[in-house]
Amino acid sequence: MTEQTSTEKVAVVTGAARGIGAATALRLAADGFAVAVVDLEETAGKDTVDKIVAAGGRALAVGADVSDEAQVAAAVERIATELGAPLVLVNNAGVLRDNLLFKMSQSDWDTVMNVHLRGAFLMTRAVQKHMVDAHYGRIVNLSSSSAQGNRGQANYSAAKAGLQGFTKTLAIELGKFGVTANAVAPGFIATDMTAATAARVGMEFEAFKEAAASQIPVQRVGVPEDIAHTISFLVSEGAGFVSGQVIYVAGGPLD
Ligand code: NAD
């Protein structure tokens, strides 16, 4: 880690060991943020941190399960002490437990609710006090096009729709403290998550991506950098009048 500069803000990205979270951490570091790379294991975030540091940035790997209240409290305290008060939060950590409703277990349901909804709630509640103190903050929650309903994802679509309501409420409650909250709802993004879905339905990932691309107006699937770019805008200082919005980043119109 290099010394903190007086203008450098601290951003927290959950689930930042890989995929959309890693791309977002790298992008925010390139934008000038010191970045806390939160994932289940501290060691898992090392790769993202090494890339940021190699590019001249400042980052810290923090191990925490976002669905665990005590781990979240400890993680945010450590970030504030070692990196600085967090003024940007990207709630990105996520899991899938896809199944048709009649086969979906209570544990499939609870796991998805706990990581996406309780995780975003606990992280935001822990970080918001730093934002309120500074009278400045930017929160971005990862929703999904699946919020509109998707076969095999009763749990995930409910959680991702729930995050949209959560986002709008944060915008209403925290606006007077200089804090904005928005949701980014990606369509198909090529990551380990969609690779796992391809495996579950018995398709090669390349064929799965081609089939998805043919249904998308821009005729390609998304890459993590597509989402990182949108998040970069939403957490910028200039985006202070954009709040409570859900931005679909899906290569075509959704609303
Ligand atoms: P991914 O599976 O590649 O990465 C998710 C990361 O979250 C992993 O590093 C994982 O270890 C971490 N994580 C999981 N549970 C955690 C927990 N309890 N605490 C801390 N970290 C945890 O997924 P991705 O494709 O990069 O997706 C990132 C986010 O974007 C997720 O919220 C996902 O639901 C959402 N999203 C993805 C897509 C897509 O097509 N890939 C589409 C819409 C929304």
Image (cartoon, rainbow, N blue to C red):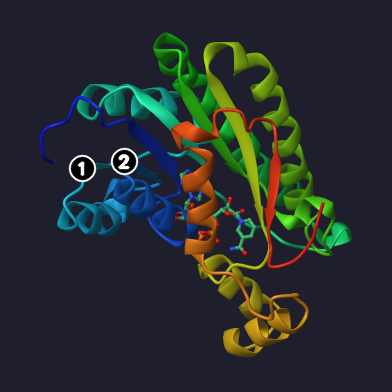
Callout 2: few (<14), some (14-19), or many (20+) C-alpha neighbours within 10 Å?
Answer: many
Question: Tag 1: residue type?
Answer: Arg
Q: Tell me, yes or no, if residue 121 can be seen here.
A: no
Q: At 45% across and 19% down in the image, what residue appears? A: 136
Q: Secondary structure at mark 1?
A: loop
Q: Which residue is mark 1?
A: 58
Residue 170, by quadrant, is: top right
Question: Tag 2: residue type?
Answer: Val
Q: Which residue is mark 2?
A: 35
Callout 1: few (<14), some (14-19), or many (20+) C-alpha neighbours within 10 Å?
Answer: many
Q: Secondary structure at mark 2?
A: strand
Could you tell me residue 126's position as x and y percent?
A: 47, 21
Residue 7, by quadrant, is: top left
Residue situated in front as seen by the camera: 28 or 60: 28
Could you tell me residue 52's position as x and y percent?
A: 24, 53
Q: Residue furthest front?
A: 238
Mark positioned earlier in the residue sequence (2 or 1): 2
